[in-house]
Structures are given as C-alpha cells and as structure tokens.
Image (cartoon, rainbow, N blue to C red):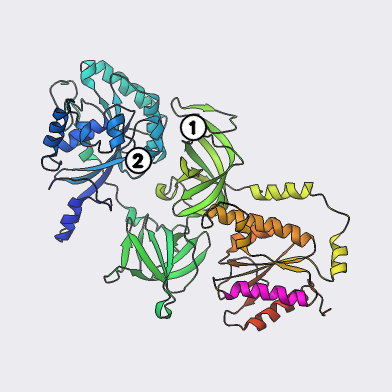
Amino acid sequence: MNAQPASSTGVSPVLHERDARGTSAPEQMDLVVVGHVDHGKSTLIGRLMADTGSLPLGKLEQVKALCARNARPFEYAFLLDALKNEQTQGITIDTARCFFKTPRRYYIIHDAPGHVEFLKNMVTGAARAEAALLLIDAHEGIQENTKRHGYILSMLGLRQVAVLVNKMDLVGYSQPVFNLITQEYSEFLAGLGVRPARFIPIAAREGVNIVTLSQPMPWYAGPSVLEQVESFTKMSGDQDRPLRLPVQDVYKFTEAEDERRTIAGTIDTGTLRAGDEVLFLPSGKKSTVKTIEAFSAENPREATAGQAVGLTLTEQIYVRPGELLVRRSDPPARVGTRFRANIFWMGRAPMLPGKRYKLKLGAARVPVELAEIRNVLDASELTSIRGKRQVDRHDVGECVFETARPVAFDLAAECEKTARFVIVDNYEIAGCGMVLEQVSAEESLLAKQVHRREITWQKGHVTPAERAAQYHHKGKFVVVVGEPHPGLPQLAKQLESRLFREGVHTYYLSLSNVFDCLGGTDESSPLAHEEQLRRLGELARLVTDAGLVFITALENADQHDLAKLKLLNEPHELFVVCRGDETPGSFPVNVQLSPKQDQDEAIQAVLQALKDQGVTPDYSI
C-alpha cells in the first residue's frame, strides 16, 4: 500500500483501509524534522518516502516529468512542496505532513518550517511529535535558528533527537568538519539537558546514509537515518498515567425532557471507565461517570489516552468548558492563578508586564498577565540577561504569570501534556511555554489594583452612615445566581420592583448591559467574560458607595466569579442569592432558594433576609 497525503481527518488512508478490513493497525509514530532554512529538511523527507517505496504509484515519475517540462532540475523536496506559495518562495511555510512506511511502522512525519518568521508553525509540528530529526548544513554550519530549534525541542520535552549533518558532499565528506559540528552542537544541547541519540553524517540529495550506509564516508560506522528512526522507542504508557481530560464542550439535549449533560473532550493521559469517581478542576465539583457515549454504536466501558469521548454523569452538575477532568483517586493536578514557566516568545511586539494576553492551556482559555520576569535567556547563546523589563521576540524567558481566574495544570516534570501552553496576543499565537512550578503570592495583581484604588479614592463629605440615615437603608450589592433560566433575571428584576415600592433606592443592571459597553469584543470569549465581571464589580463599588441596593443576575456563576466581584466591590459587601440545587462552590450564600419555589415566595425570602441583616428596615415607608 502506497502512502498518501493526510485525509481531512488527519489520519493516514492506509490506516483507514486496514481498520476497514478488521485487522489491528500497525505501530504508528510521529516524527518532526526541524532545522534552519535550506538545510535540507524537505529533501530528506522526500528521499525517505522515495527510498522506502512509500510514494503513491507514479508520483516520482510525475514530478520528474514536470521538472523536465519546466526546465528545472529535479529535487526530492518538490515531492512535498504542494502549496503554491511554498513552490514560488522555496521555503516551507506551514507544517506539512506526509507518511512513509517500513515493515515495522507507519510514520507520520512533520516537515517544520526553518525560517525564523515561521517558528510558531514549527512549534505546532514539534508539539505532536514523539521524536525529532534536526538537520544542520555541513557547509553553512550551526546557525542561530538551529539553536532556537534545539531549545524549542528541549522545552517541549522531546528527548528522542537525532542530529543529521547534511550536505556532506559540499565539504568533501570531511570527517573533521563533521566532528567539529558534533562537538559544538553537543555542548550546546548539553546546556539544555538534551542528549541526542546520534549524530549522523548524510547527503540527503544523493541518498547517502539515508536508508543504508554508503561508500563516501567509510569512517562512519553508525546507523543510517532510517535505522536510527526505527530504533526510536514508541511513546507508550499514556493510558497508565493519571487521568487528564480537558473539557472542550458540554452538550445538553432537551428533547423528551432529557436532562443529561454530555461532556466532550479528548483524553490526554490515563484511562476513563464507566463508574469512575471524577473531579473537575478548578471548580472542585465531583461526580461519577455514568456512561461513555459512542455515536451509532454500543457505549464502550472504557476509553484511553488519545481518544475523543463524550461522557455522562450520575449527578447532573454544571461544568464549564475549559475545566480539567481527573480521577479522584489519582494524583491531583495543580489549581492556581500563578505559575512559573519557561516561555519562548515569537510575537512581533515584546511581551510586557501589565498587558493582558490570552492563555490557552488544555481546553482552558483565560486572560493572563506577565507578573514577573525572573530571567531572560538568549536562545542562540544560552546567556542570561538579567534585569530586562520585557521579553523580546525570539527571547526565552523564565517568568511568573498570573491568570484572571484559577486554572488547572500539571508541572512539566510530572506530565508535559498538561503543562504545555501557548499565549495569544491580538489573535495570534505569540508564545509557547511549559509550567515549571506553582507560585503563591500574598496579593494578586487584581488585589493590588483594588488596594491602590482605595488609597487614592477621593471621598466626598457625605458619609455612608449619613446616606443610610437619609435613605433608611444601607448600600448593598445583591447577586442572584443559578442555572440558565428565564426566571433568574426575572427574579432579580421583581426584587428590584418590590424594594423600590418599599422606598428602597435600588437599581438592576444586566451583565449584557455591561457587555454593550465593551465595544467590538466577542461576547463569548473568556476575555470578554472576565472584563464584564471587572466592569460590573467596579460599577457595584460606585453604586453601593452611593447608598443604593445594586442588583444583578449571573447565570452559572462559580465561586471564582463571586470572589472577584467581592474583591472589586470592597469595602462594601456582597449579598448572594442562589436559586437551584447547586451552590457556587465554597462561596458563602446568604439565601438558598429551591428551583421549585414560587417566585413570590422566593422574593419574600430574599426581602426577609435583607431585613434580618439590617440592610433594609423592618417596616415599609
């Protein structure tokens, strides 16, 4: 069977056909080929495909004929350069994927771009790989980008690396040249903690030492490239590691009064089984897996790492996309808002403290800020630059980050898959990194901001006590929370009406009204949600300071949302009304209402609680 380009699903057609016959698929391995631009990556891959008989029938002859018609010399790289702008510019821009086969394995190979402008595309390919081939042009020698690629492979946790010293024919197959490059680059990689499996001298265009050893370099007695690739160990054991399933989405089917929620995601590590007691982080909600869902098939009893699954729970708890599902008996993931990480910055603009970015870690999407720069490393020379106030393009930084809300993660030393993250700046991936350590802080960035606000707050001559005496009630921020239901905002609005008729100065504001003030921001984005909460909290600070009872309704608010509103509303207090069976985590609730409770009865319970706490008087004006 000839290897072909990836289908739209990203799976080799070869594997589709084998599965259709009912036989077990052979072992599969992901490789990434990296190196500086024009050091021969695409040529190497084309040669591997041709020399292993993995090209579609007639493909080689077709490309050679096309070259002859256009009076162009044939290059094996042309087998991969399918994109029009790649053919015209002569550089690999995206991470091209192709396949080659041996009797032992099917290989998915990623041709990562070598040009400095496309480093982030290279990261995309390397993040999927189990092993790497790094090319160095023997004639040009080690380039700055060669060192950057070595650092990225190290940071992504790739430990199976072979360094191929290519174009040996241009230096007369010189052993001293090969030895010099081997020594210099070995010392560089040693500083990163990477020990390459082998340095192999090759001439990819000529096919020297690609599949078998060739005559031009009798002084080399190691394996060929193909033999080295075959000796790489298939990454295994992910299914035996602690369960980690990032929640990508939650579906609820309402037909025929079906109350089930189906939680969807791809298992990063571990094995999921029906009956498992599970924990969702960072919310801390617990439940038990009832079923693992299958489309048009019998539901399986278990699913393992790498599989995309849907599952239902015995208790229908509300879970947000972005949470991390873990087994309660497994070692837990970390949960926090601060972590120390290594970051490789690729953004055109430098990374700056005080600027808000978006963090993508697993399925989580949250705002993040650079809290501290501890060290900046020149990735080409591995020299430290201390005291920098920004991380410039192509710098490697050891930094502390703070997220706007807690996220769940593992450390790189424990589970690299749930320690990897990217940072988005202005809709573009600008940085990639690995979490090294969870960090605690006496004060968050938001708390410091609120502290500064209160220090500089210019107060008028009217005191809160004088306002309360004039209005016959205190200022208070009332937040009505619960599951999405038309009755939730209606409860908040009717509460405003009842308080107003009793002579209370009150005002209701919907969160959507706050969104309308943002202007041009995607309402569904996590950054918009956090900005909505921030603005709502700041407005509450003003309105409650003016002595009013400020009311809003928040659907599916969790303990972190309420904690943020409480902090922003300081020094005034929060009054939480929860309608539903599920409470917002550990955050204290002032009034708990049953979802079946009559609306008038529910409002009366809230009014009585406000009177009991001395917010409103125990009489009507």
Per the model, the C-alpha gap separating discs 2 and 1 is 19 Å
| Three-letter code for the amino acid on which mark 2 is drawn | Ala
Whether residue 487 is situated above or below residue 547 in the rendered picture: below
Which residue is nearer to you in this view: 468 or 240?
468
Q: Identify residue for label 1.
A: 393
Judge left or right: residue 596 versus residue 383.
Answer: right
User: Could you tell me residue 27's position as x and y percent?
Assistant: 21, 50
Tags 2 and 1 touching, CB below 8 Å: no
Looking at the image, residue 427 lies above or below residue 595: above
- Judge whether residue 444 can be spotted in this image: no
The kind of secondary structure the magenta stretch mainly shows is helix
From the viewer's perspective, tell me whether residue 544 is left or right of residue 115: right
| Image position, residue 241 (x, y; %) | 37, 55
Q: What are the residue bounds of the magenta stretch?
A: 486-501
Amino acid at circle 1: Arg
Residue that carries the numbered disc 2 in the rendered image: 126
Percent x, y of residue 182: 31, 23
Q: Give the residue displayed 48% in from the left and 62% down from the top.
A: 280
Mark 2 or 1, which is nearer the eye?
Answer: 1
The picture places residue 40, in percent across and down from the top left corner, at 26, 28
Q: Secondary structure at mark 2?
A: helix
In the rendered image, residue 488 lying in the magenta stretch gets the answer yes
Viewport quadrant of the C terminus: bottom right
Q: Which mark is residue 210?
A: none
- Secondary element under disc 1, as helix, strand or loop, is loop
Which picture quadrant has residue 251?
bottom left
Is 475 placed left or right of 86 in the picture? right
Answer with mark 2 or mark 1, whichever residue precedes in sequence. 2
